[in-house]
Image: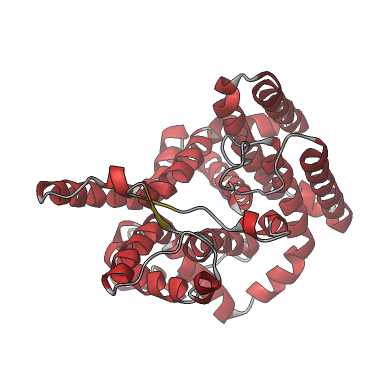
């Protein structure tokens, strides 16, 4: 911060309009758009396309993919976690490059990155801890017994924090070895899947999961360094063909399910332990993004559009942390009226989907108003 800047000028820059006005010309706005979109898709999926109901005294939320013929195909579009790690790789490499240029060390870089990630997360965990202890003191059951679904965001945040911690290493490896790093990660993923699914060595599942997310993140470096953008539509098309072709082969000839999200009753899930299918999906998504990037970038030059993206990203982690709390709170309100949760995707369940968008959405707005201060800089 410029020590000579007046408090009013500094405050103006921290408003949404101030940030819009301060956007550098060279900024790739598509990265910011996709970060916001990917988190929004996750939130809407959990609210609208989960069959949230009670099972053995605890909330559970399978999805209706296995009840709808061909619905697995939608997951090849709507499974956006690889996309989030891609844009995270782009942003984290940009941050690392800025830290190197300014002479900042690894601790300073990590402090900046983890600050934005951990402040809203720590507030979310602390508030839930206090609430749970108070609830138990009043004779209620612990949320760990009945509502583990509220902590669904934590597994993703843990995986993402892991790849952020590795940025000083993976960024250097990208500079020094580039393609060899991606090939090595791909071979490691293949070996882990083979050992687990072919020979029953379940212990390597976590290793394979870690390698998949590191690979998704590493692919974002290729976007950031300009090499894929310079390749134009031909390179983008090659990525689409490679990712799609690999996905088809893995799901048709291999032991992997076609759905990219967990389906109740399936022996193997592509999401956890995370499989090579998610890595292939990341390649496909990267190719599609590069194909549509010029059109998206032109659209994002509109002030009203870009202002919305800036505003959404300003509270993105708060929204992600608290969206399941909003859902569970709405369950309480819903049941207080005498209504019950459906355990099957019946016609009535489908008819209530708008309600399960608007209700949790209204509660989440209140939560964001209360807790966004932990994310705002």
* Nearer the observer, 257 or 29: 257
Q: Position of residue 225 (x, y in %)?
A: 70, 46
Residue 254's place in the image compared with 14, above or below, is above
Taking 228 as reference, is 205 left or right?
A: left
Q: Quadrant of the N terminus?
A: bottom left
Say whether residue 147 is left or right of residue 99. Answer: left
Q: Please state the horizontal and vertical placement of residue 60, each as a whole percent of the image.
A: 42, 51
* Residue 15 in view of the camera: no
Residue at screen point 51% across, 66% down? 48
Left or right, 353 with respect to 122, comes to right
Viewer-closest of 117 and 73: 73
Quadrant containing the C terminus in the rendered view = bottom left
- Residues 243 and 341: in front is 341
- What colour scheme does the image use? secondary structure
Q: Position of residue 68 (x, y in %)?
A: 66, 61
- Residue 320, by quadrant, is bottom left
Q: Quadrant of residue 108?
A: top left
Residue under the image location 40 percent in, 64 percent down: 341
Residue under the point 76% across and 30% down: 183
Q: Is residue 21 above or below residue 225?
A: below
**Which of the 4 image quadrants contains residue 317?**
bottom left
Residue 321, compared with residue 266, is above or below; it is below
Residue 246 sits above or below residue 287 on the image: above
Residue 350 visible: yes
């Amino acid at each position: 911060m410029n020590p000579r800047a007046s408090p009013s000028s500094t405050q103006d820059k921290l408003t949404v309009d101030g940030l819009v006005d301060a956007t550098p010309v060279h900024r790739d706005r598509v990265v910011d758009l996709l970060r916001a979109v990917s988190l929004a898709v996750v939130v809407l999926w959990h609210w609208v396309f989960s069959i949230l109901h009670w099972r053995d005294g605890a909330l559970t939320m399978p999805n209706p993919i296995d009840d709808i013929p061909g619905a697995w195909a939608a997951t090849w579009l709507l499974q956006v976690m690889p996309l989030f790690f891609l844009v995270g790789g782009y942003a984290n490499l940009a941050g690392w490059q800025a830290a190197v240029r300014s002479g900042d060390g690894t601790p300073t870089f990590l402090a900046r990155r983890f600050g934005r990630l951990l402040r809203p997360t720590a507030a979310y965990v602390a508030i839930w801890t206090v609430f749970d202890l108070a609830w138990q003191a009043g004779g209620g059951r612990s949320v760990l017994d009945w509502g583990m679904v509220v902590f669904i965001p934590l597994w993703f945040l843990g995986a993402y924090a892991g790849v952020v911690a590795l940025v000083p290493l993976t960024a250097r490896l990208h500079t020094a070895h580039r393609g060899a790093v991606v090939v090595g990660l791909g071979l490691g993923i293949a070996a882990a899947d083979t050992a687990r699914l072919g020979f029953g060595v379940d212990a390597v599942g976590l290793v394979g999961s870690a390698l998949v997310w590191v690979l998704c993140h590493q692919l974002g470096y290729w976007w950031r360094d300009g090499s894929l953008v310079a390749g134009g539509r031909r390179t983008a098309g090659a990525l689409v063909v490679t990712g799609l072709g690999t996905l088809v082969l893995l799901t048709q000839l291999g032991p992997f399910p076609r759905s990219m999200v967990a389906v109740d009753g399936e022996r193997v899930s592509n999401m956890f332990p995370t499989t090579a299918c998610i890595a292939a999906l990341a390649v496909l998504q990267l190719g599609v993004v590069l194909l549509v990037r010029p059109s998206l970038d032109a659209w994002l030059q509109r002030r009203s559009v870009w202002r919305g993206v800036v505003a959404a990203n300003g509270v993105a982690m708060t929204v992600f942390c608290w969206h399941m709390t909003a859902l569970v709170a709405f369950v309480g309100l819903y049941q207080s009226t005498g209504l019950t949760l459906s355990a099957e995707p019946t016609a009535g369940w489908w008819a209530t989907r708008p309600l399960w968008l608007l209700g949790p959405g209204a509660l989440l707005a209140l939560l964001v108003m209360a807790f966004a201060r932990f994310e705002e800089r």
